[in-house]
Image (cartoon, rainbow, N blue to C red):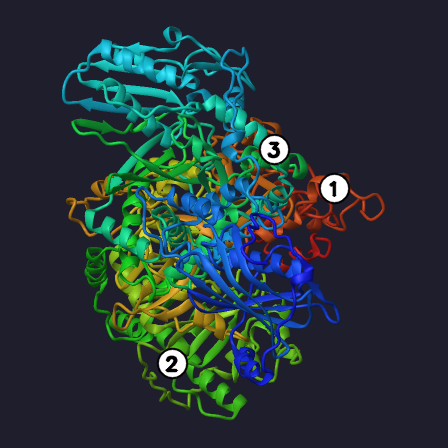
Amino acid sequence: MDDNNLGQKIHFDGATAFAFVKDCRKIHREIHSFDSVPWIPIYPLKNNFVESQYFQKDSNQVIFKFETPENTSVSDIDFIKTLTSCLRQIFPVFGNILSISGLEIPYAFIHEIYTIVEISDDKKMNINIFGNFYKLGKIDALKFEASENSKITLSILQTFFKKPIKMNLDQSLWRIGLDSLKIATLEFKLKALFEGAEFFEHGFCLKFESVRQLLEATNSLTLKKQTAKNLIKKCDLNLQKLPITEAQKQLLFLCKTKNGNEFVEEFYANFVEPLQIEKLEKALSQIYETNPSLKCIFEIDNARILSTAEALIIFTDIESFENYNFDAFSRPSLIFFIDGNKFAMKFHHILLDGKSLQLFVNQFMAFYYGIIYPSQNLNYFDFALFESHFLEKTNFSKDFDYWKNKLSIVENFPKLSKDSVFDSKDFSGSIISIEFPASLTAKLRAFSSLNSVSLFSTFIAFYRFFIYKLYGFSNFPVLISIDNRLDENFESTIGLFVNLATVSFSLNPSDNFEALLNQVLNDLNETISHSTVPFNRVISALRRELSMEPEILPEVMLVHDREATFKGVQIFASKKKKFVQNSQIWYLKEIDENLKLQIEFRTALFSEEIMQNQAKRFLILIEKVLQTPNLSALKSFDLLTKDEIDQFLEFRQSLSNPVPVISPIQLIFQKMQKNPGKIILKTSEQQLKSDVFMKRIIGYGETLKSVYEERFETSLPLSDQPVALLFNRSIDLVTLVLACWYLNLAPLMITPDWPISRISTSLKGFKNLLLITDNDKLEIDDNLFDDSVSIISIKTFQHLSAPNPTKSSHLTMASSNPTDLAYLTFTSGSTGIPKAVQSLQRGLINLWQNYSHSFSISSKSTVYQVVNPAFDIFFADIISALGNGGTLFLASQKIPKMDELKKCTHAYIMPAYLSQLDLENPHILEILKSLKAILYGGEPMNPNCLKKALDEGLNLFQQFGVTEHSIYSNFISPNDISDRLIVGQNFSNFHGYLIDSDGCRIPPINLGIQGWFRSAGIAVSRGYIGENIEKQNHELFGEEPWFDGWKYFDSGDRMKIISSRERHEDDEEEGEYDDDDANPWKYKFVFCGRNDTQIKIRGNRVEIRDVEEPFRRFSNVQEIVCLFDGKKLIAFVTLKNPSLTDEKDLRELAQEKLPIYMIPETFIILEKFPINSNGKIDRQKLFSMTTVADISQNPPKNDIKNKSSNDLSKLCCEIFAKHLKLSSILPEEDLFQKGADSLKLLMAVQEIEDSVGIKLDISTIFRQRSISNYP
């Protein structure tokens, strides 16, 4: 078959084809080595071979290996077709076959076929075919022409570059400079040009390792009969109703339903010379004629063109220009202003996108200065028609399925922290801009080029990392803006060519930045490959199918834009906008070779200070990462500047203060020995002088030592041995605490309010634990605790410690070290297994030093001890009073009594009780005013109560701290109700600062974020002691790397730094603020809650405090507590005047101040809140009261006696009824159903004791819920 011109189709004359056999031994040597070569699979068009592979020796020789089905032959025609298809894939230059010379092949082929192809420079191939160790045939000369498919594919690739480039076909698409956005566009264009729907799966371009492989693949495809260019039809502009695009329809819907008519962009420029109005009008008229879509008004699904005279609006009055009201349905959406050399334009976004604005300005400058501008064949109406046809004929089912799966979990998307409590409906915003330094721009461009990615892809990766460092979000979605011009013929068309897509990037903190960049590229490509479908169609479909809210869209959009620059023209950006589409929009703007970061944000949600600070830190992070992008793990980066690192150490040094090397008991004995006749400890009924008290302490110490050594048959340890004390507040308890210290033992405090089972569980793991208690019953029943716990009652203990006149005391005070244990207190909240905190003696001495200085406690002071002794404040009261030679006054009840309080100078009072005091009562007010310091902490005071207290001049000191770091570390003397959530200045040797989720320090500026509070200093406890506690100790406690001898504790409290403006105002009031050079680490925090107080409602993460805050500012609300039971919010409220406000009023207030998902479902109005043993609002009891509102208030008919058993019982009932604001109550009735809480019961019990001398057991009343067994 010599010199046959085959063209596109090959015909074979079977009669002349034959197999030519050579010496089998020689052939065997030629193909034997093929078994060990790395065969690469190829994908020719559908054929009868089961496998097609190739091995390329060099650019001019390749060996094909074809395998037929078992026991099945393949015809010569199928062989040639398959070979041709494979040649087109492997050799990009291979196009149509022109002729074949010297064709000698068999009729059919079977088993493995090897074909060796050699190509010469004159577009000719020589082919030899082997099989079963025989040469089966040959083609002496196969001539071909260059591939049209390769030409087309290469030309498409060149369109992605500003200038033609010399392309290395063996590099990947990434390496030649295509990013995910461009690759997705390439895929779309190839789909439009070639047949083969089964070939074009989403992301198919990424499967090719080189450009050559892409060309090989497209060579095997068939070009469509009509290209996309031939399909583009011109729109008839004479139609009354012209087509509009999907993007415009979405904006028109926005204009109808919201304030979308304010979605206006602005452009300002100053020219060197004054503008000529006639030339300006002419230039703009030319633009309007070239781009008729700029001069139209809209209906909901079509447009109508105005005449140029109607549409062209030029203002010379700036006020009229600024006040122009846009209305896309009735007025032109593009206006201009001219005044001398000043030029400005405003346009609704429905007309132009960012790229089109640049094209518009280019056209304007060309027309104004008479420069020839390339003719524009297609306008935006042509695109609208093209898009309509494209959408109509394209099946997007796979895309919809993809978005359904991706966005159906959108409710789990995290939200940015905002300045306001909830999303406002105010869409107005501000714009800030910051230039990239030239050096950073050069580094960023070089890094992107080295990694063969676009600047925008790198920008997205950096933003993703930045959000992680700010908020700790391991997965965060953003919107990206995609240019959807669909066809290269619309590249220079002016209009709105924008589609949106949601991209969600996962982040592994242990990866380096280059790994994150690769992840971002993969995610981008996957997303964009599904983004030819208009995003508004995706959202509409999902809302219908999944009943989803509009909030499914991400809060932040990222945009890549270019700004036009012209010689002699200065361009300005607007600083304000009436409508910002998203909460934030971050732009990477290219201005020639320079880069600029521009951020649009809604001012109702974010302050300008926050966004300015974030923009600057974003550039700092980029600078840091580019130093070691492939070495350092992401979690190791912080956002600090070098100056801030130095200032951190300077501030830390300023907080360091020497602490006396003395133990608490040494300090107290020194003070008592100095003034032995002073009354050092007293109650309302008893008082002890120093000399008597010291003897008592030593006597208790001798007995304690004796009992311990006898019970455990071992010597008393030198340090760190706990002794459990299960007591109500009493002189005996204080004496035992000091006796423990005298022996260098550590008192372990247990509240009597706990059930025995909880106490038993809490003490597991302790060894040789002596438990002393005022509960005689525990000593009798020795089966309640493990063998390692030995119980002795105080009565037995006192009997053993009775003075022996014949025996003199030789017990000396044990020696100790500052790092020995001082005491242990349990912490765990109200659920879970309690864990004991091991607090140090050095911490208690440091607290004494700080309290003495900050609160003016001296030998003349009397400290009121009313807090539960199992609470760590108990030790603060002891050391601050006795350590200064003052007097410790033990309260007789669990709540303060005014006639006791008036005998004191200092008192720590829980905020829950303070908030319920009647400050209108002159007697109460006079007593509180007499106190030199009222300390409180643990939870905020009610704002209305705080305001009243401040107005009356009470000496309040609000404290913050954690048990794990010696009780309190920060304090503030509040000046205003806004201070109620402020964490104030550090005590000496304490330093509280904020860290991110990786433990890195957060910069000392207001970034609008919440950080985790880290408390560092010399007094951090050793950690927890208990069962299986090692992991928690490792996670929460550690050594400070920046300061020798300091440790830290991560508290789990979420806080944010107050703004610099607020900081300076506060510092000026306190006389602390000097100038702008003050150390930035001297900031204050706002307490935002704990991680365990954050809930999730309808996919929204909500801080309980944000729900409560609007109610607290309502004048008639005394206090509010919101609880979440897993399904609904329940609000418990106390009112100042219950007659003025009911549930309906509260609900109306909620509807006014809160979004729907944050409105409590149920409001329960209480007289007072229940108080737990630590003096805080008892949330567990509130949960148990959630059903009270549904229980009938009528007493049960059968079980209630009509008469009290005796007069004493009647008196008790009357007292309880008085405190419950009831006319009467019977002994068997459930007190909590009648509205009782901890505070009411305590007040009633106290009155009964004062009136008739009977002491009721409050814990038994709680368990029985009635007084049926009393008296």
For the C terminus, the quadrant is bottom right
Percent x, y of residue 563: 29, 34
Label 2 to label 1: alpha-carbon separation: 54 Å
Instruction: Write down the quadrant of residue 1262 in the picture.
Output: bottom right
Label 3 to label 2: alpha-carbon separation: 72 Å
Q: Specify which label sits upstream in the sequence, 2 or 1.
A: 2
Q: Which mark is residue 815?
A: none
Q: Secondary structure at mark 3?
A: helix
Do tag 3 and tag 1 residues touch (Cβ < 8 Å)?
no
Q: Specify which label sits upstream in the sequence, 3 or 1.
A: 3
- Write down the residue under mark 3: 540
Q: Nearer the viewer, mark 2 or mark 1?
A: 1
Q: Specify which label sits upstream in the sequence, 3 or 2.
A: 3
| Mark 2 Cα shell of 10 Å, populated few (<14), some (14-19), many (≥20) | many
Amino acid type shown at disc 1: Ile
Q: Secondary structure at mark 2?
A: loop
Q: Nearer the viewer, mark 3 or mark 2?
A: 3
Amino acid type shown at disc 2: Asn
- Write down the residue under mark 1: 1191
- Write down the residue under mark 2: 744
User: In the image, what residue occupies the spot 21% across and 62% down?
Assistant: 649
